Amino acid sequence: MSSSASDAAVQPDALALPRAPERAPAGKTRQKEHDVPSGQNVPKLFEAQPAMRMRAADYVFETLSRAILTGELTPGSVLATQRELSHQFGVSPLVVRQATHRLEELGLVRVRQGSTTIVLDPSEASDVRLMQLQLELATPGDRLALAAREMQVLASLSLLALAERRIADEQLDELDALVDALPEAPTSREVLTFRMQFWGVVARATSNGILEHQVRWWARVMQDLEKRSAATVEASTARSAAGRTQFRGLVKALRKRRGAVDHWLKVIEPLLDWTESQPNHPVHQQQQQQRTREREKDSPETGKRARLAQ
């Protein structure tokens, strides 16, 4: 490896990498106790060694993918060698190789045989599995969780565009009944339950099976986020400004077969304002980069110092 690539590589102290969970030494087995006649050959029961090795590879994969998706490992940077990473994680080079190959399959790194591993820009990856991975790795309040919340509320606009054309009267009556049953001051859990039911009806009204599946998928995602941090979900729910009045207005627009998308876009704007105000939102990084570019135009030396400070 050239000296420049070596300097750019992630050094052992560059990332706070916790070691992978301990596993039993290779070749160790455990046999269940049975009443077996003496001298009879009994096949040994393995202690699921392959699964343990896969768990270690999963651990390395999740740690590195989280660092890439959150920007801790930036596009274009050189990943530490397999030997260095195996030392940091306390696993074999084979386990590291398995993890990096999974990263390559998702388009998060480019592996050069016998050379360096380059971190790629996750925003340019096209593998749909990457979206599921981002949601699984999201921590309440981080940029991935904020992106998930934005994507979830904006997905409702496509539902409304189709439902406005196809919704049946009995489905409209069902929506009205759900709104009437919503308490004046619901808890965050009551709001989540109501929204799952409400948007489930809207999804059925689209007569689009993929959109129906998408709504059920988002319901599971939001339930998972609530389990990890009910306070964060409650805060984002409160900022949406979507109460009984707003949902009644939405149902009214659906009955008229026009204006539903415009109505709901106004309702979700406070939530978008809230997500953008959070310190971990990518928009702040973009603004900082824009200011750096502007300073660089005025003074190249000042812009260079600003980039190094980032």
Image (cartoon, rainbow, N blue to C red):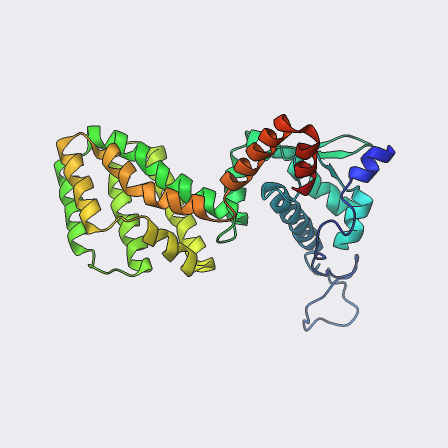
Residue 206 visible to an observer of this rendering = no
Q: Identify which residue is drawn at 14% across, 39% down.
A: 252
Q: Identify which residue is drawn at 20% across, 28% down.
A: 165
Residue 59: x %, y % from top left: 65, 51
Q: Identify which residue is drawn at 82% across, 39% down.
A: 7
Residue 246: x %, y % from top left: 21, 45
Residue 28: x %, y % from top left: 78, 61
* In the image: residue 221, left or right of residue 92: left
From the image, which quarter does the N terminus lie in? top right
From the image, which quarter does the C terminus lie in? top right
Q: Is residue 196 above or below residue 6?
A: below
Task: Name the quadrant containing residue 46.
Answer: bottom right
Residue 35 visible to an observer of this rendering = yes
Q: Is residue 176 above or below residue 303?
A: below
* In the image: residue 32, left or right of residue 176: right
Residue 60: x %, y % from top left: 68, 49
Q: Nearer the viewer, residue 23 or 301?
A: 301
Q: Nearer the viewer, residue 26 or 11?
A: 11
Q: How many marks?
A: 0
Q: Identify which residue is drawn at 77% across, 63% down.
A: 41
